[in-house]
Image (cartoon, helix red, strand yellow):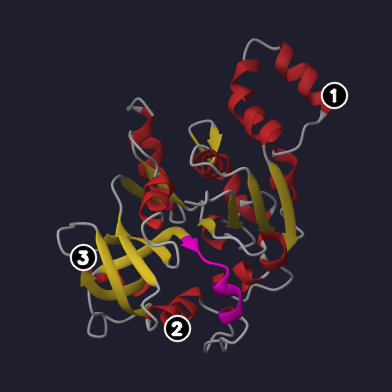
Protein backbone atom coordinates (compact mmCIF):
# COMPACT_ATOMS: atom_id res chain seq x y z
CA UNK A 1 0.00 0.00 0.00
CA UNK A 2 1.31 3.43 -0.97
CA UNK A 3 1.14 6.06 1.74
CA UNK A 4 -0.87 9.22 1.24
CA UNK A 5 1.85 11.77 1.92
CA UNK A 6 0.40 14.88 0.30
CA UNK A 7 -2.59 16.97 1.29
CA UNK A 8 -4.13 19.89 -0.57
CA UNK A 9 -6.04 22.61 1.28
CA UNK A 10 -8.16 24.98 -0.86
CA UNK A 11 -8.31 28.09 1.34
CA UNK A 12 -8.63 31.01 -1.07
CA UNK A 13 -12.32 31.79 -0.50
CA UNK A 14 -13.54 35.19 0.61
CA UNK A 15 -15.33 34.14 3.82
CA UNK A 16 -18.13 36.64 3.28
CA UNK A 17 -20.38 35.03 5.91
CA UNK A 18 -17.94 36.19 8.59
CA UNK A 19 -17.57 39.81 7.53
CA UNK A 20 -16.33 42.20 8.83
CA UNK A 21 -13.88 39.86 10.62
CA UNK A 22 -12.72 38.36 7.32
CA UNK A 23 -12.05 41.73 5.68
CA UNK A 24 -8.42 41.44 6.79
CA UNK A 25 -8.15 38.01 8.44
CA UNK A 26 -8.66 34.69 6.61
CA UNK A 27 -11.69 32.74 7.82
CA UNK A 28 -9.38 29.71 8.18
CA UNK A 29 -7.64 31.60 10.99
CA UNK A 30 -10.85 31.61 13.03
CA UNK A 31 -10.01 29.86 16.30
CA UNK A 32 -11.65 26.83 17.78
CA UNK A 33 -10.87 27.75 21.37
CA UNK A 34 -7.24 28.86 20.86
CA UNK A 35 -6.34 26.92 17.70
CA UNK A 36 -7.05 28.17 14.16
CA UNK A 37 -9.15 25.97 11.87
CA UNK A 38 -6.28 25.76 9.37
CA UNK A 39 -3.95 24.36 12.03
CA UNK A 40 -6.50 21.76 13.12
CA UNK A 41 -6.79 20.65 9.49
CA UNK A 42 -3.02 20.27 9.07
CA UNK A 43 -2.76 18.38 12.36
CA UNK A 44 -5.40 15.93 11.14
CA UNK A 45 -3.45 15.36 7.94
CA UNK A 46 -0.08 15.16 9.71
CA UNK A 47 -1.36 12.54 12.13
CA UNK A 48 -2.68 10.63 9.11
CA UNK A 49 0.81 10.35 7.49
CA UNK A 50 0.86 13.57 5.40
CA UNK A 51 3.97 15.73 5.49
CA UNK A 52 3.66 17.72 2.26
CA UNK A 53 1.01 20.43 2.13
CA UNK A 54 -0.20 22.36 -0.90
CA UNK A 55 -2.19 25.41 0.12
CA UNK A 56 -4.28 27.18 -2.49
CA UNK A 57 -4.55 30.71 -1.15
CA UNK A 58 -5.37 34.20 -2.39
CA UNK A 59 -2.94 37.11 -2.32
CA UNK A 60 -4.86 38.52 0.65
CA UNK A 61 -4.33 35.43 2.83
CA UNK A 62 -0.64 35.66 3.65
CA UNK A 63 -1.54 35.34 7.34
CA UNK A 64 -1.89 31.60 6.66
CA UNK A 65 1.65 31.44 5.32
CA UNK A 66 2.88 33.45 8.30
CA UNK A 67 1.21 31.03 10.70
CA UNK A 68 3.24 28.13 9.31
CA UNK A 69 6.52 30.05 9.19
CA UNK A 70 9.16 30.37 11.88
CA UNK A 71 9.75 34.00 12.74
CA UNK A 72 12.87 34.05 14.85
CA UNK A 73 12.25 37.32 16.70
CA UNK A 74 8.70 36.43 17.66
CA UNK A 75 9.57 32.82 18.38
CA UNK A 76 12.19 33.68 20.99
CA UNK A 77 9.80 35.93 22.86
CA UNK A 78 6.87 33.52 22.66
CA UNK A 79 8.86 30.43 23.63
CA UNK A 80 10.30 32.27 26.60
CA UNK A 81 6.82 33.06 27.91
CA UNK A 82 5.01 30.79 30.36
CA UNK A 83 2.63 29.75 27.57
CA UNK A 84 5.36 28.96 25.05
CA UNK A 85 4.50 25.25 25.11
CA UNK A 86 1.23 26.11 23.34
CA UNK A 87 3.33 26.39 20.16
CA UNK A 88 4.72 22.85 20.43
CA UNK A 89 2.13 21.16 18.21
CA UNK A 90 2.40 23.87 15.58
CA UNK A 91 6.20 23.78 15.59
CA UNK A 92 6.15 20.00 15.21
CA UNK A 93 4.27 20.46 11.94
CA UNK A 94 6.48 23.34 10.78
CA UNK A 95 9.65 21.38 11.48
CA UNK A 96 8.52 18.13 9.90
CA UNK A 97 6.47 19.22 6.89
CA UNK A 98 6.94 21.04 3.61
CA UNK A 99 4.51 23.71 2.44
CA UNK A 100 3.75 24.93 -1.08
CA UNK A 101 1.63 28.07 -1.47
CA UNK A 102 -0.17 28.65 -4.77
CA UNK A 103 -2.25 31.73 -5.57
CA UNK A 104 -5.77 31.35 -6.92
CA UNK A 105 -6.27 34.62 -8.78
CA UNK A 106 -10.00 34.14 -9.39
CA UNK A 107 -12.58 32.24 -7.36
CA UNK A 108 -13.75 29.68 -9.92
CA UNK A 109 -14.91 26.87 -7.68
CA UNK A 110 -13.42 24.01 -5.69
CA UNK A 111 -12.56 22.02 -8.81
CA UNK A 112 -10.55 24.93 -10.18
CA UNK A 113 -8.71 25.36 -6.87
CA UNK A 114 -7.77 21.68 -6.80
CA UNK A 115 -6.62 21.78 -10.43
CA UNK A 116 -4.02 24.41 -9.53
CA UNK A 117 -2.21 21.85 -7.41
CA UNK A 118 -1.31 19.54 -10.30
CA UNK A 119 2.40 20.35 -10.50
CA UNK A 120 2.79 20.40 -6.73
CA UNK A 121 1.02 17.05 -6.22
CA UNK A 122 2.44 15.21 -9.24
CA UNK A 123 1.45 11.63 -9.98
CA UNK A 124 0.39 10.65 -6.48
CA UNK A 125 -2.88 10.06 -4.71
CA UNK A 126 -3.52 12.87 -2.24
CA UNK A 127 -5.84 14.06 0.46
CA UNK A 128 -7.99 17.18 0.35
CA UNK A 129 -9.28 18.88 3.50
CA UNK A 130 -11.67 21.82 3.65
CA UNK A 131 -10.90 23.40 7.04
CA UNK A 132 -14.47 24.79 7.30
CA UNK A 133 -15.59 21.22 7.96
CA UNK A 134 -14.20 20.53 11.42
CA UNK A 135 -14.34 16.79 12.04
CA UNK A 136 -13.77 15.41 15.53
CA UNK A 137 -13.22 11.80 16.49
CA UNK A 138 -11.54 10.47 19.61
CA UNK A 139 -10.26 7.48 17.69
CA UNK A 140 -8.95 7.70 14.12
CA UNK A 141 -9.42 10.98 12.28
CA UNK A 142 -11.76 11.10 9.32
CA UNK A 143 -8.84 11.38 6.89
CA UNK A 144 -7.13 8.36 8.47
CA UNK A 145 -10.36 6.36 8.20
CA UNK A 146 -10.50 7.29 4.51
CA UNK A 147 -6.88 6.29 3.99
CA UNK A 148 -7.75 2.88 5.43
CA UNK A 149 -10.59 2.56 2.92
CA UNK A 150 -8.36 3.74 0.07
CA UNK A 151 -5.92 0.91 0.84
CA UNK A 152 -8.67 -1.44 -0.38
CA UNK A 153 -9.51 0.62 -3.49
CA UNK A 154 -6.25 2.25 -4.57
CA UNK A 155 -7.53 3.13 -8.08
CA UNK A 156 -10.54 4.96 -6.67
CA UNK A 157 -11.24 8.39 -5.28
CA UNK A 158 -12.73 8.33 -1.78
CA UNK A 159 -15.29 10.90 -0.62
CA UNK A 160 -16.49 11.36 2.96
CA UNK A 161 -20.27 11.44 3.37
CA UNK A 162 -22.86 11.94 6.06
CA UNK A 163 -26.63 11.97 6.23
CA UNK A 164 -28.13 15.47 6.16
CA UNK A 165 -31.61 16.81 6.73
CA UNK A 166 -33.81 17.33 3.67
CA UNK A 167 -33.92 21.09 4.11
CA UNK A 168 -30.10 21.23 3.85
CA UNK A 169 -29.65 18.89 0.89
CA UNK A 170 -29.32 21.73 -1.63
CA UNK A 171 -26.11 22.94 0.08
CA UNK A 172 -24.11 19.85 -0.83
CA UNK A 173 -22.95 17.46 -3.49
CA UNK A 174 -25.03 14.28 -3.05
CA UNK A 175 -24.17 10.72 -4.03
CA UNK A 176 -26.16 7.88 -5.49
CA UNK A 177 -24.80 4.39 -5.12
CA UNK A 178 -24.96 0.91 -3.64
CA UNK A 179 -23.93 -0.07 -0.15
CA UNK A 180 -21.10 -2.61 -0.15
CA UNK A 181 -22.34 -6.03 0.90
CA UNK A 182 -21.54 -6.66 4.55
CA UNK A 183 -20.63 -3.01 5.21
CA UNK A 184 -22.55 -0.20 6.88
CA UNK A 185 -20.25 2.58 5.71
CA UNK A 186 -18.83 1.94 2.24
CA UNK A 187 -20.82 2.81 -0.89
CA UNK A 188 -19.92 2.23 -4.54
CA UNK A 189 -20.88 5.52 -6.16
CA UNK A 190 -22.76 5.49 -9.48
CA UNK A 191 -23.61 9.20 -9.70
CA UNK A 192 -23.16 12.55 -7.97
CA UNK A 193 -25.32 15.66 -8.13
CA UNK A 194 -24.13 19.12 -7.09
CA UNK A 195 -26.58 21.00 -4.85
CA UNK A 196 -29.79 19.22 -5.92
CA UNK A 197 -33.30 20.17 -4.91
CA UNK A 198 -35.07 17.81 -2.52
CA UNK A 199 -36.89 16.31 -5.53
CA UNK A 200 -33.66 15.80 -7.50
CA UNK A 201 -31.61 14.29 -4.68
CA UNK A 202 -31.23 10.50 -5.07
CA UNK A 203 -30.24 10.09 -1.39
CA UNK A 204 -29.60 12.22 1.68
CA UNK A 205 -25.92 11.24 1.67
CA UNK A 206 -23.93 14.45 1.28
CA UNK A 207 -20.24 14.88 0.52
CA UNK A 208 -18.35 16.82 3.18
CA UNK A 209 -14.92 18.42 3.06
CA UNK A 210 -12.67 15.35 3.01
CA UNK A 211 -11.46 13.64 -0.16
CA UNK A 212 -8.76 11.28 -1.31
CA UNK A 213 -8.17 11.86 -5.00
CA UNK A 214 -6.17 10.02 -7.62
CA UNK A 215 -3.94 11.99 -10.02
CA UNK A 216 -6.39 11.15 -12.81
CA UNK A 217 -8.61 13.90 -11.39
CA UNK A 218 -6.36 16.63 -12.82
CA UNK A 219 -6.83 15.45 -16.41
CA UNK A 220 -10.59 15.33 -15.94
CA UNK A 221 -10.78 18.76 -14.30
CA UNK A 222 -9.13 20.24 -17.39
CA UNK A 223 -12.06 18.96 -19.45
CA UNK A 224 -14.90 20.07 -17.16
CA UNK A 225 -16.97 23.00 -18.37
CA UNK A 226 -17.76 25.78 -15.86
CA UNK A 227 -21.29 25.75 -14.44
CA UNK A 228 -23.82 28.59 -14.73
CA UNK A 229 -21.87 30.56 -12.10
CA UNK A 230 -18.61 30.15 -13.97
CA UNK A 231 -17.29 27.62 -11.45
CA UNK A 232 -15.60 24.27 -12.04
CA UNK A 233 -17.09 21.76 -9.63
CA UNK A 234 -15.15 18.83 -8.22
CA UNK A 235 -18.48 16.97 -8.13
CA UNK A 236 -18.67 17.09 -11.94
CA UNK A 237 -15.19 15.61 -12.25
CA UNK A 238 -15.99 12.88 -9.76
CA UNK A 239 -19.16 12.10 -11.71
CA UNK A 240 -16.97 11.16 -14.70
CA UNK A 241 -14.93 8.78 -12.54
CA UNK A 242 -18.06 7.35 -10.89
CA UNK A 243 -19.27 6.21 -14.30
CA UNK A 244 -16.03 4.21 -14.56
CA UNK A 245 -16.58 2.66 -11.11
CA UNK A 246 -13.77 4.70 -9.60
CA UNK A 247 -15.47 6.55 -6.75
CA UNK A 248 -16.13 5.11 -3.30
CA UNK A 249 -18.04 6.98 -0.59
CA UNK A 250 -17.33 6.44 3.08
CA UNK A 251 -19.80 7.26 5.85
CA UNK A 252 -17.28 8.38 8.43
CA UNK A 253 -17.24 7.91 12.17
CA UNK A 254 -17.14 11.14 14.14
CA UNK A 255 -18.87 14.49 14.33
CA UNK A 256 -18.68 17.31 11.80
CA UNK A 257 -19.15 20.96 12.60
CA UNK A 258 -19.92 23.28 9.70
CA UNK A 259 -17.61 26.11 10.73
CA UNK A 260 -18.29 27.89 7.46
CA UNK A 261 -21.56 28.98 9.07
CA UNK A 262 -21.82 31.21 12.12
CA UNK A 263 -24.14 28.74 13.87
CA UNK A 264 -21.83 25.78 13.28
CA UNK A 265 -18.79 27.76 14.38
CA UNK A 266 -20.45 28.75 17.65
CA UNK A 267 -21.63 25.18 18.22
CA UNK A 268 -18.09 23.84 17.77
CA UNK A 269 -16.58 26.27 20.25
CA UNK A 270 -19.35 25.70 22.78
CA UNK A 271 -19.29 21.90 22.66
CA UNK A 272 -15.51 21.54 22.48
CA UNK A 273 -14.99 23.94 25.38
CA UNK A 274 -16.68 21.44 27.71
CA UNK A 275 -15.20 18.27 26.20
CA UNK A 276 -11.73 16.76 26.51
CA UNK A 277 -10.87 17.81 22.94
Residue 171 picture quarter: bottom left
In the picture provided, is 17 more to the left or to the right than 244?
A: right
Give residue 192's position: percent from left, percent from top. Answer: 36, 78
Give the residue at the far right of this rendering: 73
Q: Please indicate, yes or no, whether residue 172 appears anywhere in the rendered image.
A: no
Sequence-wise first label, 2 or 1 = 1
- Residue tagged 1: 73
Q: Is residue 8 left or right of residue 195?
A: right
Q: 210 left or right of 180? A: right
Q: Residues within 10 Å of mark 3 (few under 14, many from 20)?
A: few
Name the residue rendered at 45%, 76% in the picture: 238
Q: Which residue is mark 3?
A: 180
Residue span colored magenta: 212-220
Q: Residues within 10 Å of mark 1 (few under 14, many from 20)?
A: few
Where 5 falls versus 15 (above or below)? above
Q: For marks 1 and 3, give the CA distance.
A: 55 Å
**Magenta span includes 213:** yes
Instruction: Confirm or deny contact between disc 2 and disc 1 (CB under 8 A).
Output: no
What is the distance, in whole Å, between disc 2 and disc 1 at their CAs? 50 Å
Q: Earlier in the sequence, mark 1 or mark 3?
A: 1
SS for dot 1 = helix
Q: Is residue 112 above or below residue 129?
A: below
Taking the spot 28% from the left edge, 47% from the top edge, the residue there is 253
- Which residue sits furthest front? 1
Quick one: 99 or 272, which is closer to the camera? 99
Q: Locate residue 19, reporting x and y percent.
A: 58, 56
Asked whether 191 falls inside the magenta stretch, the response is: no
Amino acid sequence: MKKIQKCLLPVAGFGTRFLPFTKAIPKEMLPILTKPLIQIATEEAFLSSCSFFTMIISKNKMAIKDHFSSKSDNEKLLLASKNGCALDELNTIINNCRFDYLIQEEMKGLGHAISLGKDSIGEECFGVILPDDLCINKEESVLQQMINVHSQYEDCCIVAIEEVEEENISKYGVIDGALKKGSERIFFVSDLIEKPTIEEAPTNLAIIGRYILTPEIFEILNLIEPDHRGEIQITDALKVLARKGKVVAYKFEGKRYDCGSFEGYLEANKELSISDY
